Every structure is written in structure tokens, then in C-alpha cells.
Amino acid sequence: MGDFRKIKKQIRDYLLDRDMKTGLGKISRIEGRKAVNPLFSYFYDGNELLRWRSVTAMGIVLSQLVKSNKESARIVMRRMIWNLNDESGGIGWGSPEAMGEAMARCAFIADEYHHILLSYIMPDGNFIEHETLQRGVLWGIARLAHKRPQMVEPSAALLLPYLASNDPPRQGLAAWTAGLYDCPETNGATDELKQNPVKIRVYTGRVMEDVAIGNLASSRVGYDEFPFS
């Protein structure tokens, strides 16, 4: 327990380092299996930036864990999937975002699990009904889509209900993905949103940014990825 608390404290300090690249680099040098549980705990932290940076760090840790122990990486991914299961008794904050981050950073993880992440927006799949949690799912899908667009393109039409949402964060995050594709089902809605000036708060890999939905729909918003994968 003492070792866990020490590592958890270290990881918190690294996540909040002013030089994020330096902090993440230090986390990347911690043994993967020792870093996972502290990072999970920060998915629920009250500090918004700490929560999001823990998502980034989890993606880095998993992409490296795959190189040494694929099964350990699978266990962590299954844990995130379980967190999003109704039977888990929890809500699963941070898990879909971390799944998307890990898939963006690691082709092996993406190949094995992208269909599960996409199933969370499928009415006949593992559809996530919790509207706030849907934002995390949509962010995770956007992260994957911007890195590996071919994996999300077959499911792009499923974004249409979110493009018409009265919840700006869900609408904007869906547009961030839909704007990447020439999809007959979503093109009209995406084009309309390109003029939408409403701003939503988006994590873009380094900081939280207030971004106009129109810029997201036009795919003019990038993602800062640190090279630890």
C-alpha cells in the first residue's frame, strides 16, 4: 500500500508538471502495471486537467505495455470495458476516452477493440444511454478517427443523431469526427454545423480549449500527441 501511495503521488506530480512532455516522459518510465491503478484513480479526480492528462498517460502506458506484455494490456482494456457495463455498478468516467487514446497510440489495441468503442453509439450494440458519458464516448471516437480514420468511417452514419443533439458538447464532438468523412447520411448536418459559433470545452492533448463547433465540424482542430508510443 505504501508503494502504491508513493507512485500515485509521483504520478500526480508528473501529470501536473508545467512541462507536460517532461511529466509524461517520467510516467512512461514507470513499470506499466504499477502505473495503471493510480491513473485509473485520477479518472475521477475533481481537477479537470488532471483527469484528462491521466487519459493521455493511460494511452501512453498501454501502448508501451503491449510491447512487453500484450495480455496485461488486454486486461486493462477489459477493465475499462467492464467499467462501462451496467453490471459494474459504476459510471465509467474516463474509460471511453482512455480507450480511444490507447487505440490512437497503438495499432494492436485499435485492431482488437475499435469495434467495441464504436458499439457504444450503436442502437443495436452496447449503446451508452448516459448522456454525459456519451460525451466521453464521442471524444474517444474522435481521437481514434483523427489517427486511424479508416476504422471509424464505416460507422460514420451513426453520428447523425448526435449532430442533431441539443447538447452542444455532444454535437460538437460528433462533428469533430463527422467532418473527416464524405458520408451521405451526415454531410448535410455537418455542413450546417460548419457555421455554428457556439463554443464547447475540448481537450486537445495538451490543454483544455474553448472551440467553436463550426471549427470542429470543419476539422480545423488538431490534437497534440506526445511521442512516447
Image (cartoon, rainbow, N blue to C red):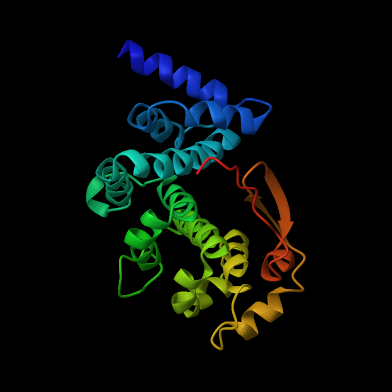
* Lateral position of residue 151 relative to residue 224, left or right: left
Residue furthest front as drawn? 67
Q: Residue furthest top?
A: 2
Q: Position of residue 67 (x, y in %)?
A: 36, 43
Q: Height in image: 34 above or below 59? A: above
Residue 121 drawn at (x, y percent): 41, 68
Looking at the image, is 8 positioned above or below residue 89?
above
The residue that appears at 32% across and 60% down in the rendered structure is: 112
Q: Nearer the viewer, residue 141 or 128?
A: 141
Q: Is residue 132 left or right of residue 205?
A: left
- Residue ID at (38%, 63%): 114
Q: Position of residue 200 (x, y in %)?
A: 67, 55
Residue at position x 25%, y 46% in the image: 88
Q: Which of the 4 quarters of the picture holds residue 20? A: top right
Q: Name which residue lies at 43% across and 38% down.
A: 61
Q: Is residue 158 visible?
A: no
> Which quarter of the picture shows residue 197?
bottom right
Q: Quadrant of the N terminus?
A: top left
Q: Position of residue 47 (x, y in %)?
A: 57, 32
Q: Nearer the viewer, residue 214 or 72?
A: 72
Query: In this view of the protein, which residue sits in the foreground, 202 or 197?
Result: 202
Q: Is residue 17 visible?
A: yes
Q: Nearer the viewer, residue 187 or 92?
A: 187
Residue furthest bottom in the image:
184
Relative side of 126 to 150, left or right: left
Total marks in image: 0
